[in-house]
Image: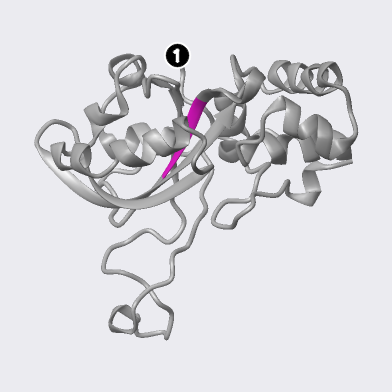
Amino acid sequence: MLPYADRSAMVSGLPEASRNPRGGDRRHNAPPHVTCMASLDAGLKIEAANADFFRHVARPSTEICGRSIYDVLHPSARNILPKHFTHLSNGQGSRFVERVVAMRGHDRVFSAEITGIAVKGEGDDLSGVVVLMSPEDEPTEAAERPARPTPVLTALDARILEGVATGASTIQLASRLYLSRQGVEYHVGLMLRRFKAPNRAALVSRAYSMGVLTVGSWPPRAVPEYVK
C-alpha cells in the first residue's frame, strides 16, 4: 500500500532552556512542523501511513504495512501503550497522548510524542486507530515532499468527518446531526470514495495528512478553506 500525502503540523510547547537566539522556542535540532501519521486496524496493524512516517522510521511501506505498530517502536513502548489502546477499545476514552521511543531502521532510536485517536464503526465498536507521532529530531536526509491534494467538503460532510475523527460512532453522529444512521453511512461512504480510503481509520489519517483536519488541537476541525 502506498503512503498517503504528507502533512506538516503540530508545534509543541517548548521549555525556556530551548529558546533559539531569535527568541523562538525550539528543541535542539527538532523540526518545528513534522507530524508522522499512520492508520491502524482494530488489531493495531499498520494499514497506511504518510511520507513522514516512513521517512522517520526509515523503513519502506512494503515492509511496514501489515505489521504491528509495536514493530516500529522501542520494546519499552509495550510497557506504556497497551493500557491506552485497551482504554480506546473499551470505550473508556477517544484519544491519548504519551511519550515513546521509536525505532529508526533496526538499530537507531528517536523520541516522540504519540497521540492515538479512536475511530469507531457501526455499533460503537472500535474499527481502527489513527496514530499521530511528533518526533523530536529529523533524519539527516529528508525526502522531497509530495504536492498536497485539495478535496472539497460540504458543511455536513465536514461535521461528519470531524465527528469520525473524534471517535464518534454512527449512532452518536446520527443523534448529534439529526440524521438517520443510513444518512450518516451514506456521507461517510462518499468521503471514503473521495479520499480513496478503505475504512474510517484510513479516512481520518488521509484527512490529517492532506491538511483537511487541524492537527495539534482538540477536538479536530475541518480547515475552512476545504469546506464549501
Q: Position of residue 32 (x, y in %)?
A: 43, 61
User: Percent x, y for residue 14?
Assistant: 38, 73
**Relative height, residue 188 to residue 11 (above, below):** above
Expressed as whole percent of the image width and height from the top left, the position of residue 155 reads: 87, 40
Q: Is residue 46 above or below residue 85?
A: above
For the residue pair 25 and 81, the one nearer the viewer reads as 81
Q: Amino acid at mark 1?
A: Met
**Residue beneath label 1, please?**
1
Q: Is residue 7 left or right of residue 138?
A: right
Q: As drawn, is 184 to the left or to the right of 130?
A: right
**Residue 72 is at least partly visible in this image:** yes
Q: Look at the image and tell me in which quarter the C terminus lies.
A: top right
Q: Nearer the viewer, residue 153 or 90?
A: 90
Please determine whether, in this image, residue 30 is positioned above or below residue 102: below
Q: Is residue 152 visible?
A: no
Q: Quadrant of the N terminus?
A: top left
Residue at the image position 87 percent from the left and 22 percent from the top: 180
Helix, strand or loop: magenta stretch? strand
The residue nearer to you, when weighing 186 against 149, is: 186
| Other residues around mark 1 within 10 Å, as few (<14) / some (14–19) / many (≥20) | few
Q: How is the image coloured?
A: one colour
Q: Is residue 135 left or right of residue 95?
A: left
Q: Is residue 138 above or below residue 179?
A: below
In magenta, the rendered stretch is 128-132
Residue 19 is inside the magenta segment: no
Q: Name the image quarter holding residue 206.
A: top right
Tell whether position 129 is magenta.
yes
- Rendered residue at 21%/49% (across/down): 110
Question: x%, y% of residue 89?
Answer: 45, 30
- Residue at x 55% of width, y 26% of height: 201
Label 1, secondary structure: give it.
loop
